[in-house]
Amino acid sequence: MPESYEHHSIWYESSLKSISDSAEILYHYDNAMHGFSATLTHEEAQLLKSQPWILAVSPSKISKLQTTRTPEFLGIDKITNQFPKLIANSSDLIIGIIDNGVWPESKSFDDTGLGPIPNTSRGECETGPNFTVSNCNKKLIGARIFTKGYESTNGKIEKNKEIRSARDTDGHGTHTASTAAGSAVTGANLFGYASGTARGMAPHARVAVYKVCWNGSCDNSDILAAIDKAISDNVNILSLSLGTIPVDYIEDMTAIGCFAAMEKGISVFAAGGNDGPPLSDTPLPFVYAGNVSNRKDGNLCVPGSLVPEKVKGKVVLCDRGSNSRIEKGFVVKYAGGLGMVEANTMENGEELVADPHILPALELGAQSGDALRMYVSSDPNPTAKFEFGGTGPNFVTPQILKPDIIGPGVNILAAWSTGSNPSSTDIDTRHVDFNIISGTSMACPHLSGIAILIKSAHPDWSPAMIRSAMMTTSYTTYNNGQPFVDSFTGKPATLLDFGAGHVNPLNALNPGLVYDLNVNDYLSFLCALNYTPSQLKMIAKRELHCDSSKQYSITDLNYPSFVVLFNGSTVVKHTRTLTNVGVAGTYKASIVANNPSVKILIEPEELRFDINEKKSYVVTFKTLGHNSHNDYDYGRLQWSNGKNVVGSPILFNWS
């Protein structure tokens, strides 16, 4: 890019304007390629191709996007045939969307054909700038905002940057809400692409939105307040397409709020994040922004301050302050940096805020920041290594497999805010009713919408039973029988990528057996983690003491997956309890593992169930040695009665 341009998008615009006064950029490409797409005549394309700075101009080929057909792909259309009361039941259920608001005028929130608002609802349509009670209806039955956490750190929300109401001026919240439970809209498309009928997973369910994100930042205190209010509003499912920093449960206010929701029978679904696999297998050069800048305020990573020759291929330490946290990431990325660490100064203390960065990034409190600055200044060759992402393992509790499950999340067409634009850039003046975007934020509402359908068919099921039904009936291969492929590496994907597998809604409605959990089971799990009485009280909101005469074990948590953490041991035992939610019958166990050094014993290998009966079993994993060049190996346990297959993934963790 010529030095005269501050940003490559401006260069693209200038290049396009040099050959056409009317053509507009459709998309900028930063990762798959460096370039843009635009609608051009043949003559304009040839003229652009002749420019010396253009490498190539290629005509666009039409592919069949399946985004408006996600319900068909998932088999949602078949569900209504097998469960005729599903539609009526789902209209009595409410899904809470914790995000950045909603564009209420979207046809995806049309309430035609819906009956009265369920009398269980305690929601409210809060008024504010450009948002009145009339913006809610029998579909969009609630809209609330939460600002105190954000404003305590950033000051009052500026009118020219954000509307201080439930109105979505970004598009993300509208997209997720309509994906989960949007009404059917015929003729939906984005510039003619993905044309068809767009509808959510549970198109007859009611929607309540809770706006907690402002200018891209979502304060934990606001998120917790939203969960708290959603519980009192009597929502049935909560969907959070928000990324957070992994911390211990006792420090994770969102996790504590979700525990409270679970106590009330509310299923909670959260996105796994989009950062992907480790940034690098080896440590990368680590530099302090103030040392690779051409300005006095370069330590703050303000636009134009970093020298690309000194930043390219490195991780940059930026000080917090002056400009936005997200903008700092843009500055580092466009200077060629591969990752960023943003460190608080004493002015910010230890306060941390989760942000949707465009590159791998880490935020640190003031004390850790000071230690890191000292390290960078004292070590002649400082390095950094990023090891986080939307994939596993579970960094908080390695004995629990994460992610749980995957769903559709790539090229998803759904409703969009016309207060925004399709590319989310300042120079884009277009407005659309639907947009195509990708991420775990899109997969999350697919799963939460499917949970509404399961809850409609089985209103007495607990959140754990719903999760179990989705996990144990999922699949892990393509239709041709080949294993899933990791799009990042091109190699076969693993349990750390897809958890139990890809959701299969039709099978999840009739899983045969489920793994159930109640509040006491989770509290026993926390006792196994050696939580103190004060910590337990903080989570459970009542006095609790772990029984000193009882031996608690993390491996006894009745989860639908297994993590065998040898960690020097040669024998690991897991206890599980299955609940029959189908017909009476006999189930037989089978198990496979890709490491022959692991011997597995299931006791008993056969279980006979009456209707609604519970039966327990024990799995013993024994190894005589590692015999593997990997940190992880994989297996699968299945119970089958000849019709239903109840599958659980097994992760062997040697490290």
Image (cartoon, grey):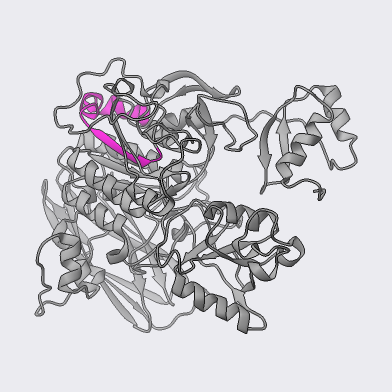
Quadrant of the frame with the C terminus: bottom left
Q: Residue 499 falls in which quadrant of the image? A: bottom left
Q: Position of residue 120 (x, y in %)?
A: 14, 32
Residue 574 visible in the current orientation:
no
508 displayed left or right of 102 = left
Position of residue 570 relative to residue 523, above or below, is below
Which segment did they paint magenta?
A: 76-100
Towards the viewer: 449 or 328: 328
Residue at image position (71%, 27%) is 24
Residue 123 visible in the current orientation:
yes
Does the magenta segment cover residue 473? no
345 displayed left or right of 384 = left
103 displayed left or right of 281 = left
Q: Position of residue 240 (x, y in %)?
A: 36, 45
Q: Position of residue 484 (x, y in %)?
A: 51, 51
Residue at image position (30%, 29%) is 127
Towards the viewer: 242 or 4: 4
